[in-house]
Amino acid sequence: MRAFSWAKTLKPRKSWRAPLKTPELTLGDLVDRYLPYAERKLKASTYSGVVLHLRKHWAPLHPCALKELERRHVAANLSRISASSGPIGANRSRAALSALFSWAIGEGVSDSNPVVGTNLSNEVSRDRTFTDEELRLIWLHAGSGQYGAIVRLLMLTGQRRDEVGAMRSIELKLEQGLWTIHPARTKNGRAHDVPLSPTAIEILRACPRLPGREFVFGEGPGPFSGWSKAKASLDKRMLSAGPLAPWRLHDLRRTVATRLGDLGVLPHVVEAILNHVSGHKAGVAGVYNRSVYAPEKRAALEKWAEYISNLNIGT
């Protein structure tokens, strides 16, 4: 008969361990986690805006732990953004942060979205267009650097700020006088051909190119940055010539569209220049009509460049 062993009936004693303490996740940490996901999901032009809003506009809250970040903190920073970048900038920053927290909730790293319940800023519809004298002053005082080239190209082409600021060398065919914006960089997701006037070509040929760099403007790995500082410097130079009404770079695009109409350019050609898709160009037909108005677009933009040159911009 075997002796009974109590050792076999005893369960091994588990050693007690204190719960692991993980570092508190901050808003800055969350931004770092989110941006690679956003880069895969968003168009390049949209993604660059999200980076600006999350990295710059929400930087004051980056050190805050997520569990301590409340609606009042978000609302206070939105007021600061609105004061420095305007209501549109505040609303875009609000949308970027809200999308970040929606993603975080889905990932299980946040229980709530502190953006919910904060107020949208009141966006006033703008209809600012420039007089001939204002166009002349902007051209004259734009400067000789990269920002000056960008401003003059915005005036000559009527394209969007980020489309010019993130222009890539591979998009340019200067011998043919053509700039083709990649679909990933356009608002409607369609490739856009922009005829370049001789003046625009001259500006682009004068821009120094760094070997191996894909972007025409900017320094480092990305496109042009420092928009606010460069715009403030331009405003200061223009103010030396007299009073200046508030303006934005996007007003150049509106001015080009308005003035082309004044010069007799037909509305559908103006829309083609701006890469607006509506009316008979909407839908499937728009995909195949990309080059239908190529000669008309070129004639219109060359006519506009001649108009600009006649404003005594060299005086």
Image: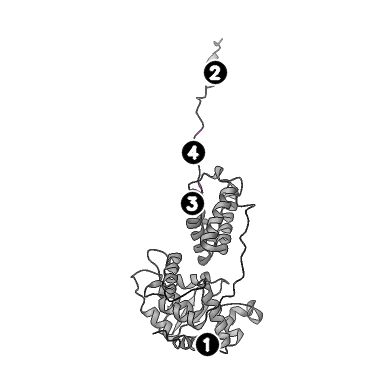
In the rendered image, which residue does mark 1 sit on?
A: 300
Mark closest to the chain's N terminus, 4 or 2? 2
- Label 3 or label 4, whichever comes before in sequence order: 4
- Nearer the observer, disc 4 or disc 2? 4
Instruction: Give the residue pinned by disc 3.
Output: 60
Residue 225 appears at what percent x and percent y? 43, 65
Looking at the rendered image, the quarter that the C terminus falls into is bottom left
- Looking at the rendered structure, which numbered label has been put on residue 183? none
Amino acid beneath label 2: Lys
What sort of colour scheme is used for the picture? one colour
Residue 236: x %, y % from top left: 42, 70
Give the Cα separation between the discs numbered 2 and 3.
61 Å
Residue 94 versus residue 228: which sits nearer the camera?
Answer: 228
| C-alpha span from label 3 to label 4 | 23 Å
| The magenta segment | 18-29
Quarter that holds the N terminus: top right
Q: Which residue is mark 4?
A: 22
Report the Cα–Cα distance between label 2 and label 1.
Answer: 94 Å
Mark nearer the N terminus (2 vs 3): 2
Tag 4: amino acid: Thr
Dot 2 corresponds to which residue? 8
Task: Give percent across and percent down for residue 223.
Answer: 43, 67
